[in-house]
Amino acid sequence: MNYETARKFLIDQTNTTEEHPDSLLMRMQQGKPPIPGHITSILLALKVVFETLKDATTIDRELANALYVLSVKTQQLFTAGRKLGVDWPPLLKEDLLRIAIAAESIFSGTWHTLG
């Protein structure tokens, strides 16, 4: 996966239009878990973006918004879904934390890991 593909993929994951019915944000808003392999693909894309931008001094707004949404909004949806009785996959909470840590890594320029 190259940077442009990774960037587009991450932005698409925050799209909640009918053209993106399987985006992470759309599925979570509907109380549905990610499709198999989805989180792995997101984490891979985040790593590609990190490697490309680790020495950059700026990040474009569209990508920054996607990183924010993937970091914060997904965790909010997870919590809201849990309160409504959504039976999320057992590791989703940790996966969302890994996504947030990877996004933080992109902003800081230093790769961080869970634990």
Image (cartoon, rainbow, N blue to C red):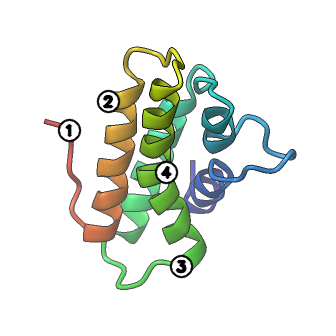
> What is the C-alpha distance between the residues marked 2 and 1?
9 Å
SS at circle 4: helix
Q: Amino acid at mark 3?
A: Asp
Q: Real-space Cα distance between discs 4 and 3?
A: 19 Å
- Give yes or no for contact between labels 1 and 4 (Cβ–Cβ under 8 Å): no
- Residue type at mark 2: give it: Glu
Earlier residue among tags 3 and 1: 3
- Mark 2 or 3 closer to N-term? 3
User: What residue is shown with label 2?
Assistant: 94
* Closer-to-camera residue (41/34): 34
Q: Which quadrant of the rendered structure holds the C terminus? A: top left
* Mark carried by residue 73: 4
View extreme (left): residue:
115
Helix, strand or loop for disc 1: loop
Q: Which residue is mark 1?
A: 114
Compute the Cα span from label 1 to label 4. 19 Å
Mark 3 Cα-neighbour bin, 10 Å: few <14, some 14–19, many ≥20: few
State left or right for residue 5 relative to residue 59. right
Q: Amino acid at mark 4?
A: Lys
Q: What is the quadrant of residue 25 in the picture?
A: top right
- Drawn side of residue 2 relative to residue 15, left or right: left
Q: CA distance from mark 2 to mark 3?
A: 27 Å
Q: CA distance from mark 4 to mark 2?
A: 15 Å
Q: Is residue 18 left or right of residue 65?
A: right
